[in-house]
Image: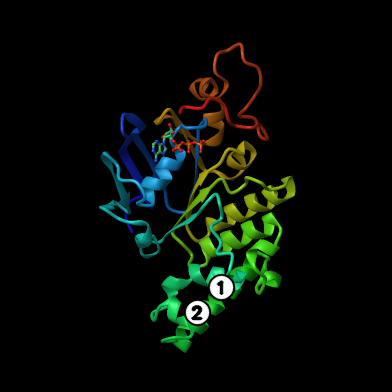
Amino acid sequence: MDGPVLSVEHLTVAFGGLTALDRVTFDVPHRSVVGLIGPNGAGKTTVFNAVSGVVRPREGTLRRHGRPLRRHRPHHLPRLGISRMLQGLGLFPGMTVLENVMVGADPLATGGLPGMLTGLGRAPRDERRVRGRAEAALHEFGVADAAHALPGTLPYGVQKRVALARACVCFPELLLLDEPASGLAADEVSELAERVRMMRAHGSVLLVEHHMDLVMRVCDRVVVLDFGRVIADGTPDEVRADPAVERAYLGPPEDDGDLLAPGGPGEAHDGR
Ligand SMILES: Nc1ncnc2c1ncn2[C@@H]1O[C@H](COP(=O)(O)OP(=O)(O)OP(=O)(O)O)[C@@H](O)[C@H]1O
């Protein structure tokens, strides 16, 4: 297939009088991890929302392999090979871990997941395929033991792995990860870094993250937003050395600290 997995071209999004994104342009190449960073309010979530079809851009184009995405909605994402792990995890509390991951595997079913889960209009072959793939994903993410537990009974780090398993169960070509390191302990972040790198074997990842250690370790490229504009786009080393990025994070020169150093907090002003 031609062209990057995702091209964001001159994307402009406005909320009333506020321009949240101003001609944002960058690519996510095939089998790469691209980080999207920037201070609070810089527009990172708005990029995800535009890519997910949650907000409509005022101007600009999103392309998959060079073909424009027009008026797509969140429920079209599985068909487009795009999956998103939300910051709030979004696990269904009344469903077991296995059932939650089966929801992510729904596109593998031809007869429809609701029928499968309720037993109405059940398609046994579909159920076997979806269940088998969901169980394999639980194994891959080290949460097979929790298959029959309800998410709320599990530690947060385990719930995160379940959410990741659900996002990856269909081998998305583009995975949108929204602050996956938030709330994780240091050893869990290292494990997450390993998993994000492994995801390149199947597809590409667009990663919004304040945890600079993770960003600098796993990303092939890093795009930096500030007040809705791209102020840098390069390798982690190039971005780290960019004075414009340092200014965006640190503010005036008299401020101390190395916020872009691995382990730094990576948040500064609030653009709201
Ligand atoms: N639905 C909305 N209505 C009005 N303004 C919005 C809406 N969503 C976002 N904004 C504004 O758009 C700007 C960009 O917000 P966005 O949430 O994309 O930033 P962010 O980089 O993801 O921030 P954070 O790191 O704090 O999550 C902010 O000024 C925010 O207040």
Q: Residues within 10 Å of mark 1 (few under 14, many from 20)?
A: many
Question: Which residue sits at x=26%, y=53%?
Answer: 71
| Above or below, comparing residue 9 to residue 93 in the picture | above
| Above or below, comparing residue 176 to residue 115 in the picture | above
Q: Quadrant of residue 159?
A: bottom right
Question: Which residue sits at x=74%, y=49%?
Answer: 187
Where is residue 192? Give x, y as percent.
64, 52
- What residue sits right under mark 1 in the picture? 99
| Above or below, comparing residue 119 to residue 233 in the picture | below
Q: On the rendered structure, is 26 left or right of 40?
A: left
Report the coloring of the rendering: rainbow
Q: Between disc 1 and disc 2, whose residue precedes?
A: 1
Q: CA distance from mark 1 to mark 2?
A: 8 Å
Q: Ligand 1 is located in which of the four quadrants?
A: top left
Where is residue 254? Give x, y as percent.
61, 11
Q: Nearer the viewer, residue 265 or 159?
A: 159
Q: In what element is the residue under mark 1?
A: helix
Label 2 near label 1: C-beta < 8 Å?
Answer: yes
In which quadrant will I find the C terminus?
Answer: top left
- What residue sits right under mark 2 in the picture? 117
Q: Nearer the viewer, residue 67 or 89?
A: 89
Mark 2 CB lies closer than 8 A to ligand 1? no
Question: Which residue sits at x=71%, y=58%?
Answer: 155
Question: Which residue sits at x=52%, y=61%?
Answer: 167
**Identity of the amino acid at label 1?**
Glu
Q: Which mark is residue 186?
A: none
Where is residue 211? Give x, y as percent.
62, 39
